[in-house]
Amino acid sequence: MAKFTGQIAKSVTSTTVGVGALVAAADGGGNMHRAKLLEFIVGSDAATLGTANFRVEFQQCTSQPTATLVTPFALDPGDVAPAATHLFTNASANGTLTSGAIMMTIPMSEQATVRYVANPGSEIIIPAASGRGIHFMTPVCGNNPSIAGQVTFEEL
Amino acid sequence: MRSARTEGGAIEWTYPAGRTFIRPTLTCAHCNRITIIEQGARADDCGGFCLCCMKPTCTQCAGKPCTPFERKLEEYEARGRLLRSMGL
């Protein structure tokens, strides 16, 4: 039941390759753990921003992306690192996405910052199955601005 | 952030001039999708309500047989365990 938070970012967004992902992976003993997405904050940190359309989607996946693994920060100093949940950032290639399985669509403008908070019991749940999870996609990103976000999750 | 009317959560947009918009969200009990509830939206536009598990559902799951997301999670995980035990 440890809570973690980590940053995702990408300097040039892409309509086809996501920003990052939160996926389940086996821990050292081969055990799997579920995870819950508690909070998601996203916006663009570009110096000059237009008003082009920007859309962030959470899409289900069955394998992890080619991306940088983030070492998330434990909200409780007593916790160490997540045992079996991987947070990825700056993806260069997607994992295997589940077609049509969009868990959430966030319509926004490049100038906006968005914060989503789930109430207890209503979070997006990452199954305890290897590679299962969600990719943070930007299928609409006019002018391909940079993107930065903060993902807070709980590993069960 | 102000608490939302619904139990699913809330989403807040903040624009440069300091304008903010907050909308409640709904989490589907059958597929775990998040629906943003627009201001003034009718209940039918936001999804349905499953009388079997007594929880809200999204528009795609509305009116369909009750398959709680928890059961789907167990199926995903059972499949994962089977594949792992087979070394795949």
Image (cartoon, grey):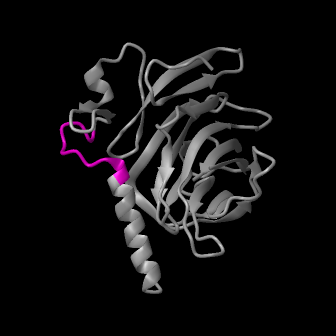
Q: Answer with left or right where residue B5 lies relative to residue A144.
A: left
Q: Position of residue A155 (x, y in %)?
A: 61, 53
**Residue A35 included in the magenta stretch of the image:** no
User: From where the camera sits, is residue A15 visible?
Assistant: no
Q: Answer with left or right where residue A33 lies relative to residue B49.
A: right
How many numbered tags mark residues here? 0
Corner quadrant of residue B2: top right
Depth order, front residue of B79/A7 = B79
Depth order, front residue of B24/A79 = A79
User: From where the camera sits, is residue A114 visible?
Assistant: yes
**What residue is drawn where x is 66% and y is 43%?**
A152
Q: Main secondary structure of the magenta part?
A: loop
Q: Position of residue A144 (x, y in %)?
A: 65, 45
Which residue is farthest bottom? B87
Depth order, front residue of A120/B1 = A120
Corner quadrant of residue A141: top right
**What residue is drawn where x is 71% and y is 20%?**
B16
Q: Answer with left or right where residue B73 lies relative to residue A86.
A: left
The range drawn in magenta is B60-70
**Residue B66 included in the magenta stretch of the image:** yes
Q: Position of residue B77 (x, y in %)?
A: 42, 65
Q: Answer with left or right where residue A74 lies relative to residue A20.
A: right
Depth order, front residue of A139/A120 = A120
Vertical placement of residue A110 versus A61, above or below: above
**What residue is drawn where x is 74% and y is 53%?**
A72
**What residue is drawn where x is 33% and y is 27%?**
B46
